[in-house]
Image (spheres, rainbow, N blue to C red):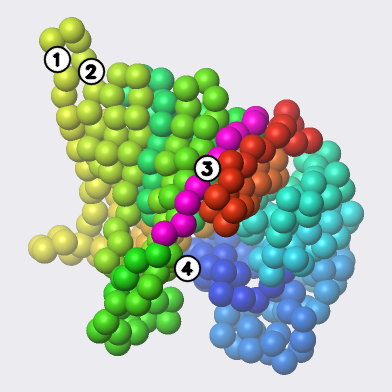
Amino acid sequence: MAPIRFGVVGSGWRAEFFVRMARLMPERFQVTGVVTRSAERGAEVERAWGVPTVRTIEELVTSALPGSGTDRPEFVVVSVPWPVTPEATAELVSLGIPVLAETPPAPDADGLRELWAEVGSSGLVQVAEHSPSMPSHAARIAVVDAGTIGRPTSVQISSTHLYHAVGLIRRLLDAGRGEVTVRASTFTAPLLGPLGRDGWTGATEPADAWNILATLDFGSGRSALYDFTDNQWHNPLRTNRIVVRGSHGEIVDDAVTRWVDERTVITSPIVRRVTGLEQNLDGFDLEHLSLDGRVLYRNLFQGARLADDDIAVAALLDATGAWVRGEGPAPYPLADGCQDHLLGLAIEEAARTGETVRTGREAWADA
């Protein structure tokens, strides 16, 4: 199959994640161009990333028309500051170009509603919510979807923040896009911060760090507990934790406990198989995750030696490519991205005010 061709609007930290996938797997992905605001930044990107750049979205798309000598993108990744995302998304939709918009698709609730009113009916917009595509989460989703723990009823998550966590919660609970009741509190406590995005900090004494605890009531017996601490993405003193409870068992991180018959309950681990350890000379890479000999998740990008976050990005690009070619379902529709951010905003509001926040049914609820 021909590589999936995509363009990128934006040249920041997250945009480079998508471009890197094409650099590592040129047989799968091709970047047709990157939109930067200035020629100076464009020159930097061309040197560092090895891809062509243009200044406008129209140039990215129209310069690749038949006869131009370049390939037209099959879709465009929008990875720009939050306030700019709706503008770039709407412009691409007006040109008939499918979009994979970075999270969140708009900065606030009004922006989400305006964006949906403008482009929601187009069916051209997907959102780059990658958490459910991460290998461990994909394996847990496979366990839930198989009915192994019965009907899923609650999720407790402490790993990623707001819309990312909400997207995973809703997928595990099959919660849809209906009304939700949110309660939250913020606490401050001392925490050492030895590591940040830019590396080791050299800190040796704790400083005050905030922590948000929130509950989400989706109705019909489905609920979630959200627990996130400032800089939890990077701080190795706060590990990831997830619990998925169901009517017939639960998943606690990588342990699956379930009912088998009237006298039997068993617990089995989700096992991650990797190469490159000790005397294995095949190079460090993820092969698959399994439960009791059944493969739950298989790495489709084996050989590229990707971290889990990169695997999730590659999976989104791959799924979006299949979607635009009519070979697969929509990977993460705009309606889901809007709902995720709406609930993330509700968590922040409840934490800030101490009041219960109830979200209603929005225009995208039944999309």
- The mark nearer the N terminus, 4 or 3, is 4
Point out the stretch of residues depicted in magenta.
178-187
Find numbered disc 2 in the image and state the secondary structure of the residue it sits on. strand
Q: Name the residue under label 2.
A: 259
Answer with the quarter of the image where residue 256 lies. Answer: top left
> Could you tell me if residue 72 is visible in this image?
no
Q: Mark 4 points at which residue?
A: 24
Answer with the quarter of the image where residue 72 lies. Answer: bottom right
Q: In this view, does 126 lie to the left or right of 201?
A: right
Q: The C terminus lies in which quarter of the figure? A: top right
Q: In this view, does 213 lie above or below 304?
A: above
Residue at x 29%, y 34% (from the top left corner): 251
| Cα separation between marks 1 and 2 | 6 Å
* Kind of residue at disc 4: Leu
State yes or no: discs 1 and 2 in contact (Cβ < 8 Å).
Answer: yes
Find numbered disc 1 in the image and state the secondary structure of the residue it sits on. strand
Residue 128: where, in percent of width, then height?
A: 60, 53
